[in-house]
Image (tube, coloured by chain):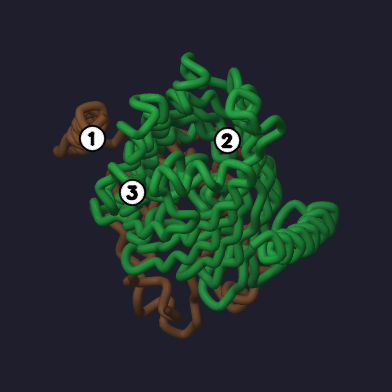
Chain colours: A brown, B green
């Protein structure tokens, strides 16, 4: 029984080993349709944010045009595209709000809905989310 | 003892029914959760294991049951049916979760001994196991820490009490106790970019067949550390397939019945579907190995079906 278990563990270890390849990789950026795809996604995402009662209060005083541009630039950079996000850092821009894990996850859900609506493959969605999720450390400030 | 079990059962049933009502009302009301509630992402609270704790079908994970995050209460209720060639198990229970920090679980298993009861001169024999569980997340976040290998880690205990009915004197003769407490350490990690969830659990246990045949025995070696593993692959946000393996002790082998009470590890292949945050259904093919091979010699493979209401 122990042998079978070790075999499973070994298999898992191999799976982990094939993860990141390193080097410049813009495959996520491409899977999102490059710059036009990201603009379309954010054109869809931001109105969804404002329509969600869980999230609207956080963004009611935000310049939405600016927000959209910043998000496109950020997603572009995070997904390996040819952009440099030059906006405010995540910690200071969220410091004025009490943000809990539930709020963070609510935003993830709305982003997932927008990605679904844009027909982005589930696997590509998860690769993008895996790049974004670690930002929770700077964004969630109400432990 | 029967009185105590009856009381447990009654309380559990009311609790489960209350949760069911809650779930249905919510499900009817809206797809999503109201603002400020249900902070977890879909399926990230796992499903209900047969022992009650949130996890896979056969093994607990480090996640907490229900959809609560910080400062919220979450809850689930579940009913599970397992049917193998010769035996059947009905399990039901509920979980109360505090944030993604702690969970309290109750479960009852009712095992239909099939042809083994009559063979022992105990027709209609059923084994009833009550399980009270507590789980505490001690570190990590299974979902959001996607840039590190750090898993979500939890420790838990499961106190189990067996009502073996007419089999109780036999178990006593075998040196098996009618109650025991498992302690476990679980590590759960979602490899988000790959859409693969892995859980490893190490359980310290004396249980024979999960406690359905009591705990330890004359020839047993006391508390044993047993590994359990689950792998799940997310096909869609609401759909996962996977496999589980649960190693078990073999305390009643040999016994006065020779190898007749030998037990095997458990394994399953499952598909879990959560159409909303309030409902999930898990279907599995299970291999429970040999169960009392003195009477029934073939391996006990079969189907596992579980429904969960969550809040």
Q: Looking at the picture, tell me which residue is in the foreground, B277 or B49.
A: B49
> Would you name the residue on which mark 3 appears?
B201
Q: Chain of mark 3?
A: B
Q: Name the foreground residue: A80 vs B284.
A: B284
| Rendered view: B71 above or below B32 | below
- Category of crowding for the residue at label 1, using alpha-carbon neighbours closer than 10 angstroms: few (below 14), some (14–19), many (at least 20): some
Disc 2 crowd, CA 10 A, few/some/many (<14, 14-19, 20+): many
Give the secondary structure at mark 1: helix
Could you tell me which quadrant the C terminus of chain A lies in? bottom left
Q: CA distance from mark 3 to mark 2?
A: 20 Å
Which of the 4 image quarters holds residue B140? bottom left
Q: Earlier in the sequence, mark 3 or mark 2?
A: 3
Residue A31 shows in the view:
no
The location of residue B28, given as percent across then percent down, is 85, 53
On screen, residue B251 above or below B299: below
Q: Residue A54 location, x and y as percent? A: 65, 69
Residue under mark 2: which chain is it in? B
Q: Residue at x 27, y 53 (%)?
A: B147
Residue nearest the observer in this picture, B87 or B119: B119
Q: Which mark is residue B272?
A: 2
Q: Nearer the viewer, mark 1 or mark 2?
A: 1
In this view, the residue farthest toward the top is B298
Query: Which residue is tagged 1?
Result: A9
* Picture disc at residue B289: none
Say which of marks 1 and 3 sits in front.
3
Proximity of marks 3 and 2: CB atoms separated by less than 8 Å: no
Q: Residue at x 52, y 18 (%)?
A: B296
Secondary structure of the residue carrying numbered label 3: strand
Gap between marks 1 and 3 measured at Cα: 12 Å
Residue in the foreground of this view, choosing between A28 and B91? B91
Q: Position of residue B110 (x, y in %)?
A: 65, 43
């Amino acid at each position: 029984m122990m042998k079978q278990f070790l075999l499973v563990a070994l298999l898992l270890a191999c799976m982990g080993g094939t993860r990141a390849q390193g080097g410049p990789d813009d495959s996520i950026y491409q899977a999102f349709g490059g710059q036009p795809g990201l603009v379309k996604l954010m054109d869809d995402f931001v109105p969804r944010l404002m329509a969600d009662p869980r999230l609207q209060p956080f963004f009611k005083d935000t310049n939405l045009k600016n927000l959209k541009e910043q998000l496109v630039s950020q997603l572009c950079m995070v997904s390996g595209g040819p952009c440099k996000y030059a906006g405010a850092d995540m910690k200071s821009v969220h410091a004025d709000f009490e943000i809990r894990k539930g709020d963070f996850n609510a935003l993830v859900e709305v982003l997932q809905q927008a990605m679904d609506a844009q027909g982005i493959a589930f696997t590509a969605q998860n690769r993008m989310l895996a790049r974004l999720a670690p930002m929770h450390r700077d964004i969630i400030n109400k432990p | 003892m029967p009185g105590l079990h009856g009381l447990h059962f009654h309380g559990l049933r009311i609790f489960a029914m209350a949760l069911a009502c809650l779930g249905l009302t919510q499900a009817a009301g809206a797809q999503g959760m109201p603002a400020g509630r249900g902070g977890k992402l879909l399926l990230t609270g796992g499903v209900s294991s047969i022992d009650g704790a949130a996890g896979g079908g056969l093994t607990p994970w480090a996640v907490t049951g229900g959809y609560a995050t910080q400062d919220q209460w979450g809850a689930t209720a579940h009913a599970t049916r397992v049917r193998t060639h010769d035996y059947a198990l009905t399990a039901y229970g509920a979980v109360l979760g505090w944030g993604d920090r702690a969970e309290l679980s109750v479960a009852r298993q009712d095992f239909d001994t099939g042809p083994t009861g009559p063979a022992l001169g105990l027709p209609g024999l059923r084994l009833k196991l009550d399980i009270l569980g507590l789980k505490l997340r001690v570190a990590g976040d299974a979902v959001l820490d996607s840039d590190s290998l750090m898993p979500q880690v939890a420790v838990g205990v499961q106190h189990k009490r067996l009502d073996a009915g007419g089999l109780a004197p036999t178990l006593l003769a075998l040196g098996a106790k009618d109650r025991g407490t498992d302690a476990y350490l679980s590590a759960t990690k979602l490899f988000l970019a790959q859409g693969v969830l892995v859980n490893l659990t190490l359980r310290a246990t004396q249980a024979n067949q999960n406690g359905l045949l009591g705990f330890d025995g004359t020839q047993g070696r006391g508390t044993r550390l047993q590994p359990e593993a689950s792998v799940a692959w997310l096909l869609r946000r609401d759909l996962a397939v996977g496999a589980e393996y649960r190693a078990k002790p073999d305390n009643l082998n040999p016994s006065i019945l020779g190898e007749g009470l030998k037990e095997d590890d458990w394994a399953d292949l499952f598909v879990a579907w959560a159409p909303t945050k309030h409902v999930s259904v898990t279907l599995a093919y299970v291999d429970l190995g040999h169960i009392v091979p003195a009477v029934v010699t073939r391996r006990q493979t079969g189907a596992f079906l579980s429904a969960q209401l969550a809040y």
